[in-house]
Every structure is written in C-alpha cells, then in structure tokens.
Image (cartoon, helix red, strand yellow):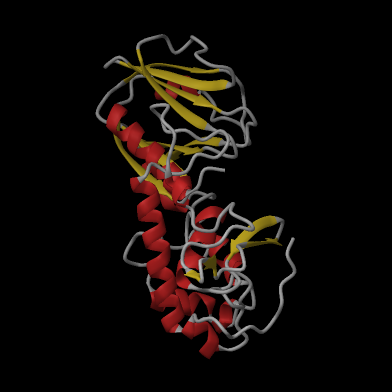
Amino acid sequence: MPELPEVETVMRGMKAALEGDVIAAASVRRPDLRWPMPVGLADRLAGKRIESFRRRGKYILMRLSGGQSVLLHLGMSGRVNLGEGGSADDVAVPHEHVAFTTRGGKRFGLVDPRRFGALDIVLTAGEDSHCLLGSMGPEPLETAFTGAFLASALAGRRTPIKMALLDQRIVAGLGNIYVCEALYRARIHPATSSALLDRAACDRLVAAVRAVLEEAIAAGGSSLRDYVQPDGELGYFQHAWRVYGREGQPCPDCGVEADKPVCPGIRRITQSGRSTFFCPRLQVESVNKDAASAGKTGRKAVKVKSA
C-alpha cells in the first residue's frame, strides 16, 4: 500500500500538472471501488476549475471551484496516470476506472486493479470532518507533532510502539515501512510498550520519523509492487532502507570488528499480521523507562521470537 511519502509524491505530481486547469470531460467506468462512487460524479467534475491540492494522512484532496473537493485514496494497488491528450472515454490502460481531461490538454486516469481505493466528493470547508479524516491525529511533518505530544498520546498505553505509530488516531499517514525505519534510527525496539517511552525517547522518535519521511519524499517514495510516480518513474528510497526487507543482513550502523560485521543480522518478527524488521543489537526491548530513554544496547529483557 502506498504510504505517506508515496501519496505526497503523487499529490505533488497532480498539483504540478493540473492545478489551475479546468476539467473538460470525465468518465466513470464502474459504480464503486472499495465503496460506491459519488452519484453523478462525471457531471459533477466537468467544468470545474482545479483550485489546489492537499494531502491528509494517506488521502489526497483535490479542491475544485464551487467549494467541493475530490477525496482520493489509492488503496492497495491504486495509482494515478497523468498524460497529454486523449479522451476521457479512452481506456488508456487496464483497470482504469475513472478518467478526466482538462482544457489545457492534460489527462488524468485512476488505475486500481484490486479496487481497494476510494473516491468521494466532500465540501472543501468540511474536509476535516469527513468520516475518513475526522479522527486522524496530527501530520508527522507539521509542528503539532512533537515529542511532548507523542509522550502524552502514548501515556498509559501498553500497545507495542510500532502498532501505536500505525494508529492513525495518534499520528496520520505512517505506514509499515517508514515506522520500521524510524524505530531503527531512534534505537527503539518495535515491541517496546508505548507507555515506557519517556519524553527523551519520544523526542528522538519524532525526529527520526521526520527525517525518514523527508528523505523518502525527496527520493520520490519507495516502489513496491504497483506503486510508481504519476509520470511513470519509480521511487528510489527503497535503496536507502536500513532494515526493512533486509532480514539476515547486517545493519549499516553496527560496524565491523576484525573484518567481520558486529551486527548479528536484521531480524523479522510479525506484529498484527505485518512484518517488522529491526536490529537486535541496536534496538533492545525495554522493560523500564530508563532503558527506553537511553536507546542503548546491552539491556536485553524480553526475547522476541523471529517469525
């Protein structure tokens, strides 16, 4: 599933190509994706000026003239195709379910083979009260997401910290790949109880989350299975993954002694059905706040079985 950097990359591509243009014609080829399409969607899009774009979590909001916004979620396999010329009625590629053309000669296509994506029309003034957005926490790249906020949000929670970060009510838009990478950089074991993270650990984790996301966005996101950028290019951050998908390989930070890697090898465990990757030497599960705050090696407490 595209995560925040991928969605941000798609949103920026749409903004660069479409902002300020007017939708000339639209075509909707099926009545639903994950949920039913808005009634009369094609007619409601035609003639509208594309005013601006916004990302909220993993959702893209395309603001239109007339005070309405298109809410778009790419689901598991959705992607956006942007091109020049052609008709909205042409099926450019298989599984293209929605398309529109603009007066400026652009063509937008929403491709979603598995149909787990979503598309809705909402009032621009009421975007944040939409049922899919209303309960979201702060954006991880905005100023409201701080160590103090995170420490307060995690207080008293026994949930493993990785699962807490994936909870969109705590922080919006984080996904499996980038949470694994941020926890590694913050030297926090993914199974550590959230309540054990004190302010110092939360400060370190917030900084790591921001750094990972900013680097991934700059690299155009990661390419996993169906994801490509709107211009067809692949994202390249996957080449900078330090732990994700690297089970058994040495991490990049443990170093070498006597010409041999010190790292015992990146491990993979399963948490709530998702693969989690971490370095067992640098990310040690903590049983008290002192250990969680230190983020150091040598405080091994609870053994976690490899999946």
Point out residue 199 in the picture as x, y percentages from the top left corner. 43, 83
Name the residue: 31% across, 65% down.
143
User: Which is more toward the observer, 120 or 272?
Assistant: 272
In this rendering, the answer to whether 45 lies above or below 154 is above
User: Which is more toward the observer, 239 or 77?
Assistant: 239
User: Which is more toward the observer, 157 or 184?
Assistant: 184
In this rendering, the answer to whether 270 lies above or below 301 is above
Point out residue 257 in the picture as x, y percentages from the top left corner. 50, 72
Q: In the rendered picture of this protein, how many numbered marks are placed on residues?
A: 0
Point out residue 148 in the picture as x, y percentages from the top left corner. 40, 78
In this rendering, the answer to whether 103 lies above or below 10 is above
Point out residue 165 in the picture as x, y percentages from the top left corner. 54, 65
**Residue at far left of view:** 20
Quarter occupied by the N terminus = top right
Name the residue: 38% across, 61% down.
210
User: Which is more toward the observer, 72 or 226?
Assistant: 226
Asked whether, in this view, residue 275 is left or right of residue 117, the answer is right
**Residue at far front of view:** 258
Quarter occupied by the C terminus = bottom right
Q: Is residue 99 visible?
A: yes
In this rendering, the answer to whether 27 lies above or below 155 is above
Q: Quadrant of residue 207?
A: bottom left
Q: Is residue 175 visible?
A: no
Asked whether, in this view, residue 146 is left or right of residue 283, the answer is left
